[in-house]
């Protein structure tokens, strides 16, 4: 029987724990504050930003909102980041991506103080993760690790296959699974004999950005399948990179879309804001 890994429930648990932690911190006179910067009025970004603010409110993190017009120049944005880097009362800075085309995303992410980089995208934090030093970890892959641990899935010694090698999901995912003592293989668009490799996986994490790409032919009987993908079809229905109906009958556990990895990303962002570098 395939078990459903309930990301909604696990993310609620984490947020509840963080809310208690923040309340204890407040009693000791400590406050957490996240600055969220959005440039332009991309509707999807506006929803993400709103959800982040809502989560801050629930947990007790003060949030500062910078809604900058679409024509904001790169220099103006960098000045805002500089100001926030210098503010002692701000411990997290998040720039909502994507940025308008005239702004160099890399330059902006590099400008954030690595000690306030709660998204974990700064090369200093990526480097720290790769050499096993404390730092901020990218929220989505960190959320996948929490999903596995809190569902009682052991990672140590397991064959783990990560499908996708993006900087924000695939690569940090592979590093985190390695840190948890999994034996990790990373696949990408140039991988040959893809199904042969994915069928070796005890734990298969899929982040390739292609709706319902992974069918039962990619999955070993009894594997744990984590679907990071998120897509909306023509009828407005959400689906993942995994063909859920095809894979669920062979998997031992699987994350649904929606309600799997998605809610974990914000929960881990909140954890980064509360716990600081860990
Ligand atoms: P991305 O930057 O587009 O990377 C996709 C990766 O998949 C690349 O490494 C690419 O290989 C690989 N790939 C593409 N087609 C492939 C194929 N046919 N066979 C094997 N590998 C293939 O995507 P991403 O940012 O990692 O996101 C992946 C998915 O997760 C998307 O659906 C995204 O919306 C979703 N996502 C969800 C959350 C969340 O909170 N739930 C967060 C982030 C992303 P190459 O490197 O060779 O091009």
Image (tube, grey):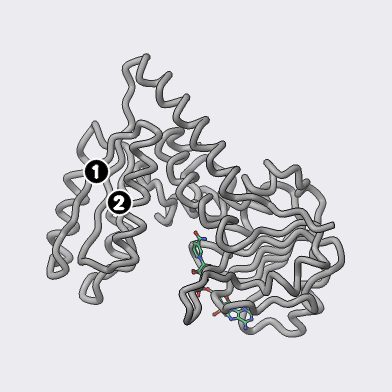
Q: Which element type, helix, strand or loop, lies under badge 1? A: helix
Along the horizontal axis of the image, is 72 left or right of 29?
Answer: left
Residue plotted at (50% across, 78% down): 233
Give the distance between the C-alpha atoms of the residues marked 1 and 2, in whole angstroms.
7 Å
Rendered location of residue 83, percent (x, y): 16, 45
Q: Which element type, helix, strand or loop, lies under badge 2? A: loop
In the image, residue 102 above or below residue 133? below
Instruction: Decide if ligand 1 comes within 8 Å of the CB at mark 2.
Output: no
Does residue 208 appear in this view? Answer: yes
In the image, residue 126 above or below residue 200? above
Residue plotted at (74% across, 48% down): 181
Can you tell which quarter of the image residue 53 is in?
top left
Along the horizontal axis of the image, is 214 left or right of 138?
Answer: right
Does residue 127 appear in this view? Answer: no
Q: Residues within 10 Å of mark 1 (few under 14, many from 20)?
A: many
Residue farthest along the front direction in this orientation:
235
Foreground residue, 271 or 243? 243
Foreground residue, 124 or 187? 187
Residue plotted at (13% across, 67% down): 73
Q: Residues within 10 Å of mark 2 (few under 14, many from 20)?
A: many
Residues tagged 1 and 2 counted as in contact (Cβ below 8 A): yes
Residue highlighted by disc 1: 85
Quadrant the N terminus occupies: bottom right
Residue highlighted by disc 2: 112
């Amino acid at each position: 029987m395939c078990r459903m890994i309930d990301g909604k429930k696990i993310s609620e648990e984490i947020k509840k724990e963080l809310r208690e932690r923040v309340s204890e911190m407040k009693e000791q006179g400590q406050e957490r504050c996240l600055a969220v910067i959005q440039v332009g009025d991309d509707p999807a970004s506006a929803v993400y930003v709103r959800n982040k603010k809502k989560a801050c409110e629930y947990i007790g993190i003060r949030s500062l909102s910078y809604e900058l017009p679409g024509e904001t120049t790169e220099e103006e944005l960098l000045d805002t980041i500089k100001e926030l880097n210098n503010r002692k009362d701000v411990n997290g800075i998040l720039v909502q991506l994507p940025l308008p085309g005239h702004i160099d995303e890399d330059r902006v992410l590099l400008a954030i103080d690595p000690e306030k980089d709660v998204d974990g995208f700064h090369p200093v934090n990526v480097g720290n993760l790769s050499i096993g030093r404390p730092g901020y970890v990218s929220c989505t892959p960190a959320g996948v690790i929490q999903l596995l641990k809190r569902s009682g899935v052991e990672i140590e010694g397991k064959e783990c296959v990560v499908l996708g090698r993006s900087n924000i999901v695939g690569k940090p995912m592979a590093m985190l699974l390695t840190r948890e003592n999994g034996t990790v293989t990373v696949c990408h668009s140039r991988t040959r004999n893809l199904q042969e490799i994915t069928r070796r996986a005890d734990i298969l994490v899929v982040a390739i950005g292609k709706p319902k790409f992974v069918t039962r032919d990619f999955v070993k009987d009894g594997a744990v399948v984590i679907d990071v993908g998120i897509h909306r079809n023509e009828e407005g229905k959400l689906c993942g990179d995994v063909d859920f109906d095809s894979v669920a009958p062979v998997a031992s556990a699987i994350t649904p879309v929606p309600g799997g990895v998605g809610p974990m990303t914000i929960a881990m962002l909140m954890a980064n804001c509360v716990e600081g570098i860990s």
